[in-house]
Amino acid sequence: MHRSIGAVATRPFARRLLAATAGLTFGLAAALPAMAQDTIKVGILHSLSGTMAISETTLKDVMLMLIEEQNKKGGLLGKKLEAVVVDPASNWPLFAEKARELITKDKVAAVFGCWTSVSRKSVLPVFKELNNILFYPVQYEGEESERNVFYTGAAPNQQAIPAVDYLMSKDGGEAKRWVLAGTDYVYPRTTNKILEAYLKQKGVADADIMINYTPFGHSDWQTIVSDIKKFGSAGKKTAVVSTINGDANVPFYKELGNQGVKATQIPVVAFSVGEEELAGIDTKPLLGHLAAWNYFMSDKAPINATFIKTWQTFIKNPKRVTNDPMEAHVIGFAMWVKAVEKVKSTDPDKVIDALPGIEAPNLSGGTSKMLPNHHITKPVFIGEVRGDGQFDVVWKTPGLVPGDAWSDFLPGSKDLEADWVTLKCGNYNKVTKKCGGAS
Amino acid sequence: MGYHWAASFPDAGTITMRAFGDRFIALVLALILSLILSLILSLGVLPALTTGACAGPYEDALARFTADNFDDTIEGINGVAASGNPLAATVIGALQEGRLLFSAQDKRVFIKDKSDRLIDAATGQPVVGDAPADISPVRLNNRLRGIVEAALGGLTLMAPDPGKRLEAAQAVLKSKDANALPALDQAIAKETEPKVKQALVEARAAVVLYLDSASDADKIDAIAVIRQRGDQDALALLGGLPGSASPAVKKAAADAIASIQNSLVIWTALQNAWYGLSLGSVLLLAAIGLAITFGVMGVINMAHGEMVMLGAYTTYVVQEVIRARNPALFDYSLAIAIPLAFLVAGLVGILIERGIIRFLYGRPLETLLATWGLSLILQQAVRTAFGPTNKDVGNPSWMSGSFDLGQITITYNRMWIIVFTLLIFVGLLALLRLTRLGLEMRAVTQNRAMAASMGIRTARIDALTFGLGSGIAGLAGVALSQIDNVSPNLGQGYIIDSFLVVVFGGVGNLWGTLVGAFTLGIANKFLEPFAGAVLGKIAILVLIILFIQKRPRGLFALKGRAVEA
């Protein structure tokens, strides 16, 4: 909140400056190969500066790597792939501008990008209007299915619900009291609404649920951690479900460690903390705290070992970690390549129709499938923080879980269904038998 | 040594009756022999025979660890703990610390000791030769960690080290494990250390309270003991009482809960005040450099946060060098980083003043835009040089953890930051009041023309003053690296708060900045429990806006001629 105050007066200047630098750098980079031969362009729409650069820069790099690998294999449809990188600078309206630029000016065949839900919402109208394809690689709150968007990250039923199920199980500690802590924006608010409804359905009383929101980049966690301790001292096993995003996690976990909140007493399961986030913390005090993802770097599958090796060679850093959204891009890119090869064209309409049903290997040794609702099937893992910043998988779903666009636990969305193959609709109401949402 | 034996041991399925008979004889023989010789013969065949053949409860339990299955591991822990084997505490201690390894192929369990040597868990002897290839740590989850803590607590109640005994007592208090009762009684009788004894008595009370077979009178006595403890653990124990308890016990527990909660109300207020002080000190730390550049010089420096960020990155670089060259110095890393951060940020500050700001004096809007652009450039430069991800800046051991003062938890890092902030504040005041540089700074900012005609080189003083403000921001970075992310965005989170503090406290007045920072910190922390972090922050902003309407010059307005300058 406070950040935007500074930005109001000065944004035009900042934006001009950024646009100028970004334009200069990428303009030069893009100009050279473009002259060489006819290529297929792939747009990469990830923030390389500003608050989200911390997470999104890695995704840009992994896309560059995937495109390079594909070109080594001979490209696509006999043409080389060419990455077009733009920097929306963690600025939500700029995401829409840059998306428009990618589609109209650079004429990309598909775009891989966005991290925060608000950036995705900001580009949606652009993709609809200009009819292009967006692959969105991050776990999100669901409640959406668009014809032009393919969601390769987890829907709530592929992350949040299984994590709560685990904490309720014997191995997870049979939690009876719940703290839902999150950053104050759309993803945590919607996820927590779904979780609250789910918990109540499971017989958890109102008094046993504590919901807490904090601003972006919150750094003083003393009060909240001591509130959690207090809430946890009512004699019932307590667990924390954290949808705290990005930068705020490091001080949160530091405070947990310092105030001696151990995972054996009050486990914290996080939906936005992966290997990359842990790289900035000493994880020894956090032993046993949990994260729920569809991929962990510590996965022993051979395909994962190959991926890690390729990644570390590409980025020239043998210590660089991999994480879940990177895997989502790997799957999404492989699916797009297969769909393009299937219809022998990069025409968005044809590719969108071809994508549902396409299968691609995920990095935990299974095969994910694109569903008619534009979400994919994924395994769900619960991992425990290890001393070395990696996760130990302590639980996983028996099979792959199909992503559900519309949560069954929210009154507004439980009757909705997304199906772009037979129903040709992203929000078909099963009760009124009409396409067009809840009411 | 024992490796070859184990490798040639037949599978359970192929053991014939004859083999079984052989084994039985071998077992008896080995038992007798080992009783005589086990200590003398530490190498050779015989101890190996005992490990393989003597499948006592301890060995059976150990074998459970090789199944790599959480339920088997629980059986293993309980079996080892109940076996009475002298190695039990070592094995479970190693399990807790992730030093218990197993080989599924060879069905053997090893302990990795502190110097990375492998020890056979069955015999307690070092392993000779190569370890099996498939060796990996026995995995734990949170349920198991609780069981491990309880088991270890029961086993170490009589440990020679009082610290260990205290930990054990606390573990039993949490586990409420009825099996630990005899050991507890024994330990209480022998204990001489009053603090440990108290903990043991409380642990016993917790066990009794949850023991179905205990009488109501015993339980009510136990409640009295726990009530004395008066903290959140006590509340948890009393609150979690099973519904099957008798009405008298329930009533005693409810009374105890009410009385503990009453006394905790005061502690909560104290805790909030402490949190407020701590938040205030962080605000002060971030703002104090700005109080110089903005407050004294009047330069709106939007790149102030980036000076803080540079200080934090200096700390990171210092720690990286220490980790690579001399890890023993790690606890001193902050002491080394403090002067370096001051120099780095100070020098960058002087460069900024000489390169940009000196051309813009008296043009606040342009200064604001230029320094904002500069802040973006600095952020992106750091992002290019160090990468966009967070950097791991470790807490030295003396800044990790917390201690309890009455019923409030005080974390060491926050406490040292308060001390550090106050030291900087006092140092800065002394510098401005007592040194020649301070005198010249005040002279230049109060009346530039007069100062110049007195022979003060005002341009040099401007550069030094800006450098000082930036250097102090660098110092703030060292401290903030201990509690916040070290990322290129670090400074952005503090810039607006810093301006708020300086404006609220009164521009140009260091004492105003001090009072402003602590007022905002404490107000924020008292609002947060009621309003939540988001609304609390909004409320503070609204209050400041209203306050500035009433007193545009802040809490401590400068009076006299300096105002017009």
Image: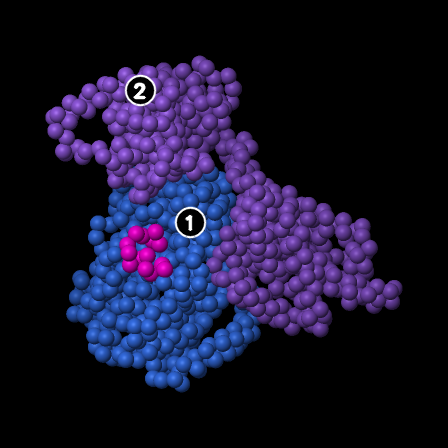
Chain colours: A blue, B purple
Subunit ID for the residue under disc 2: B
Which kind of residue does numbered mark 1 sit on? Answer: Gly
Residue farthest along the right direction in this orientation:
B454
Q: Which residue is the site of mark 1?
A: A389
**Left or right: where B447 falls relative to B548:** right
Q: Residue at x 45, y 43 (%)?
A: A284
On the question of residue A1 being in view, the answer is yes
In reply to whether residue A308 is colored magenta, the answer given is yes
The quarter of the picture where residue A420 lies is bottom left
x then y, percent, for residue A296: 34, 53
How far from the left and from the top, in percent, is residue B524?
55, 49
Stretch in magenta: A296-309
Say which of B497 and B534 sits in front.
B497
Q: Mark 2, residues whose alpha carbon is within 10 Å: few (<14), some, or many (≥20)? A: some
Name the mark on residue A159. none
Look at label 2 and name its amino acid.
Ser
Residue at horizontal 19 percent and vertical 24 percent from the top: B23
* Chain for numbered disc 1: A
Please rate how many residues cluster around mark 1, counting C-alpha atoms within 10 Å: few if below 14, some from 14 to 19, many from 20: many
